[in-house]
Image (tube, grey):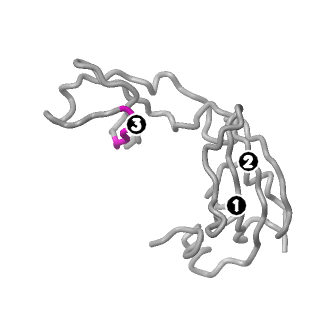
Amino acid sequence: MEIMDGRVATIHYTLTDDDGIVIDKSSPESPLSYLHGAGNIVPGLEQALEGKKAGDTLTADVPPELAYGPRHEQLVQQVARAAFPEGADITPGMQFEAHGDQGPIVVMVTEVGDEQVTIDGNHPLAGRTLHFAVEVAGVREPSADELSHGHVHGEGGVHH
């Protein structure tokens, strides 16, 4: 059975950056399952997996435009330290939800000074080419619930 829109694909993957450093990977006992065509994974990887079958292996170099998009410097801002709760332990790497002109956005603290805190609203992988090494572990038809919800339930998928 081939990977195509509306089918559940289960994959083992390793994601690396341009320097070959591992950013993320599935564990051997817990591969990633997703509903193909539902936007559950980055578009470039989804395109590379189209038509593959269980047992197939591939590598895919996914440019930013087909992953998490380009980096937008206007999403990096300085915020007064006083805007945070008094006594809060704000440290680089913390993430929180902020409210912007177009609704909520997840931002990451990148620098903390005495007076200013630098936050970044870009996805951590924005502007980066992603390198995937993938093995297709399986392909199946989705359940009616998975189709109606737009994602895989249970093992390797979303847990409600």
Q: Is label 3 in a helix, a strand or a loop? A: loop
Label 2: which residue? 132
Task: Write down the region rendered in magenta.
Answer: 92-97
Let me know if residue 55 is in the magenta part: no
Q: Identify the mark nearer the N-term, 3 or 1.
A: 1
Q: Which residue is mark 1?
A: 37
- Asked if residue 81 lies left or right of residue 27, the reply is left
Disc 2 or 3, which lies upstream in sequence?
3
Res. 34 in view: no
The disc at residue 93 is: 3
Spatial CA distance of label 2 from label 3 is: 24 Å
Identify which amino acid the numbered label 2 is placed on: Phe
The residue drawn where x is 56% and y is 74% is 153
How dense is the environment of label 2, judged by Cα within 10 Å: few (below 14), some, or many (20 and up)?
A: many
Q: Residue at x 61, y 49 (%)?
A: 24
| Residue type indicated by callout 3 | Gly
